[in-house]
Image (tube, rainbow, N blue to C red):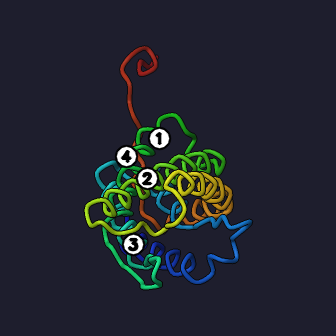
Amino acid sequence: MRWSVFIIIVLFTCALDASLGAVFEIGGIRGQLLPAVVVFMCLAAPKRIAVRAAMLAGLAADLFAPMVLADGTLLVVPGPRVLAFALGALAVVPLRGLLYRQNPLSSSAATFLFSLLVGIVWVFLWIIRSVILSSSAPWWPATGASEVFLRVFAAVGDAALALPVCWLLEKSRPLWGFRVTMRVSPGAARQGL
């Protein structure tokens, strides 16, 4: 995988999510483009590289999307999405054997799973942070359960956006430099006549 291509696309999609994200908002639910990019990479890159790249994308997401606290101040905490993206990548990577990677529908389903896990971990980490620091969570005065429900609907939005995004990324596959290896299995299929 070419890291330069991945970093440029991650920064570009983070900027699009931060600036034009309201365009993709329906009923208070905002879909994001970054999860589709990370899932596309996770379905093609080796596991070790996929988890590291997902963590890098999570760091970019943390830096591009500061939290607005109850008093109106901005808070940038690098870490919650880093850990959440790592868990999401660890969930998507084993699915590679089950999914047809070039199909946008399978990428969309993997994006739903990825975004759902990222949302749940993100809420959990913010709850832990607010308990440790005796502060309020970013979604206060609503409850953490209502925030989880919003994250589930956001995962549906991310999966819907993943259809065109993964289709476009599939067209750019030669730029990414993914290595293609074939698995050879022993047996009668290998025997020639």
Q: How many marks?
A: 4
Residue at 62% over, 76% down: 21
- Crowding at label 3, few (<14), some or many (≥20) Cα neighbours within 10 Å? some
Q: Position of residue 142 (x, y in %)?
A: 54, 62
Q: Quadrant of residue 49?
A: bottom left
Q: Nearer the viewer, mark 2 or mark 3?
A: 3
Q: Quadrant of residue 75?
A: bottom left
Quarter of the image for the N terminus: give it.
bottom left
Q: Nearer the viewer, mark 3 or mark 1?
A: 3
Say left or right for 137 vs 21: left
The residue type indicated by label 4 comes to: Leu
Question: Reading the chain from its start, which is encountered first: label 4 or label 3?
Answer: 3
Mark identifier at residue 65 = none
Secondary structure of the residue carrying numbered label 2: helix
Q: Nearer the viewer, mark 4 or mark 3?
A: 3
Q: From mark 4 to mark 2, how far is it between C-alphas?
A: 9 Å
Secondary structure of the residue carrying numbered label 3: helix
Secondary structure of the residue carrying numbered label 1: helix
- Crowding at label 1, few (<14), some or many (≥20) Cα neighbours within 10 Å? some
Say left or right for 80 vs 100: left
The residue type indicated by label 1 comes to: Arg
Residue 132 lies, with reference to residue 180, above or below; the image says below
Mark identifier at residue 96 = 1
Q: From mark 3 to mark 1, how far is it between C-alphas?
A: 27 Å
Q: Nearer the viewer, residue 16 or 165?
A: 16
Cβ atoms under marks 3 and 1 closer than 8 Å: no
Q: Position of residue 10 (x, y in %)?
A: 45, 72
Residue 14 seen in the current view: yes
Mark identifier at residue 62 = 3
Secondary structure of the residue carrying numbered label 4: helix
The residue type indicated by label 3 comes to: Asp
What residue is disc 2 on? 42
